Amino acid sequence: MATIVVCDGEVEGGGGDVDGCDGERSLDLLPAALLETIMTKLDVASLCSLASTCKTLKSCVTRVLTFTPNFHVFCRLLCLGSVAEKVGRTISRCALEDLLNGCSHLEVLALMFDLSLYLRPGDGRIFGLVSDKLTHLELGHISSRMMTQLLTSTEMSGQDSNRVSSTVLQNVQQLRLSVDCITDAVVKAISKSLTSLIDLDLRDAPLEDPRQVSDLTDFGLQEINQNGKLKHLSLIRSQEFHPTYFRRVSDQGMLFLADKCLSMESICLGGFCRVTDAGFKTILHSCASLSKFSVYHGPKLTDLVFHDVLATTLSLSHVSLRRCHLLTDHAIQKLASNLKLENLDLRGCRNIRNEALQAISDLPKLKVLLLDGTDITDTGLSYLKERVLCSLVSLSVRGCRNLTDKFMATLFDGSSKLALRELDLSNLPNLTDAAIFALAKSGAPITKLQLRECRLIGDPSVMALASTRVYEDECPGSSLCLLDLYDCGGITQLSFKWLKKPFFPRLKWLGITGSVNRDIVDALARRRPYLQVSCRGEELGNDGEDDWDSADIHQHIEAQEDELEQWILGDEGDVEMEDAEDESEEDASEEED
């Protein structure tokens, strides 16, 4: 399957020196038009391979992939990023029209930028040019008004033009949108126009409280799933810019929704502040096929929602109850009676304590456990050691301020084989280097380790992790792909000596405090070009899962090339870091004098 990932205005090759092609001079003698005509017969993968060989071919491939009138790309997935937006370049309507018109076999389209910045309200109809084979559509941001016009204009244009059909978007099965405000109108337009829709993900983040005429209400929920094919639904109102919620949706709206979604398999609801236990229970008791249930910031959701969950035929595998502050251990004890639970997210449930962990310890298939901000202690986490730790792949205890080094010594004592790959220990004020020593000594194959805002973590932790040998035949520290040390109080320039090659050969993301020494940080970033160094506190490796619970359409895009295969055998580049370190030491000596 051919795939295009557009990140800038050029075609990026996968290796080779574009300046050093032996046949470049001979190719220059051939007319560019002849080369480009030949290239139109090739698939995208072959074109990208050609682009990596020399300047001449790269230039020709770049022109070919600008979708000249006689060229149609036989690709099935297209992801257009936001690089043009970041560098201040505009995306014209004509360019987007040519792009969509050129991809006649497109099945997956992701436009990950703010379309409202580049398109006028009437430009939404250009989406009528997309392939009738399109099944997955994702838009980074679009106004609800433009989205409504987009869906209605494709219907209307079918009456006036032979080129655009009213059925253009009817084959779309998965729709992921971020809009300025989710309204009844946009929900109705989606339900009416996209008759094949199986997966619907809608998210908004209003700048102010919406007016009644431009908001989602109980009647809007009644419009969802008119065709009865919907299996996955996500409706989230984020408080990223303003503390606003779905204030016009009540338990009655949940009743309408449950009546339309009897065959639903996953439901994610965020920001429904007026919905009570009665509304959420209606969903749980009506959707017999439900396997994933998520509620984000449900201020009126209590233990009563799960009081009689055993009376249902539900077999939940994923449950997320983020920031549901009224939940207690009793609700988790009821949930834990479902032994098929694999993913449990309790972040921000501040009344969850050790009794909940005791119940969770009986879940034999649990793979992901997120406990950020809960009231657990070392004793509670020790309950996980017997059964859960053997299957657990991801554990997060960020901000659990009662925890100390003791739970790390208990979990990583080397007595059992660990499946754990991701561990978040951020913002634990009592965590010290001793905890990281226990982790390193256990040889656990951790790939993602977050230690941000742990003020007692310092250079010894970095040295211990760098010296870890997970597999005997591989390099030290080979398992770590992400290491977040932002705002760790004990990190000095000594740690940077251990962040150079050959240590941490698979590291792709590094979080560090830039004020430690900016010159050394910059030198490290230049020395390891495949390493993304963050100095401003950004969350690393964030793929958006917190906002979107449905399947990721980017799973078709190949992973980034491993840096282990990009090692430079010589010492070139280390001199730059050493010079920066020497300058730093000289400055420190002068200050002491």
Image (cartoon, rainbow, N blue to C red):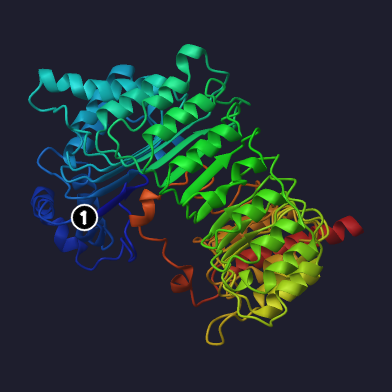
Q: Position of residue 164 (x, y in %)?
A: 14, 27
Judge whether 556 appears above or below 123 on screen: below
Q: Is residue 119 visible?
A: no
Judge whether 318 appears above or below 568 on screen: above
State which quadrant residue 30 falls in: bottom left
Q: Is residue 257 visible?
A: yes
Towards the viewer: 557 or 183: 183
The residue shown at (51%, 46%) is 293
Q: Residues within 10 Å of mark 1 (few under 14, many from 20)?
A: many
At mark 1, the secondary structure is helix
The residue to which callout 1 is attached is: 44
Q: From the viewer's perspective, is 95 left or right of 286?
A: left
Look at label 1 and name its amino acid. Val
Q: From the viewer's perspective, is 336 left or right of 213?
A: right
Q: Quadrant of the C terminus?
A: bottom right
Q: Position of residue 395 (x, y in %)?
A: 63, 61
The residue shown at (16%, 20%) is 157
Q: Position of residue 73 (x, y in %)?
A: 17, 47
Q: From the viewer's perspective, is 304 left or right of 588?
A: left
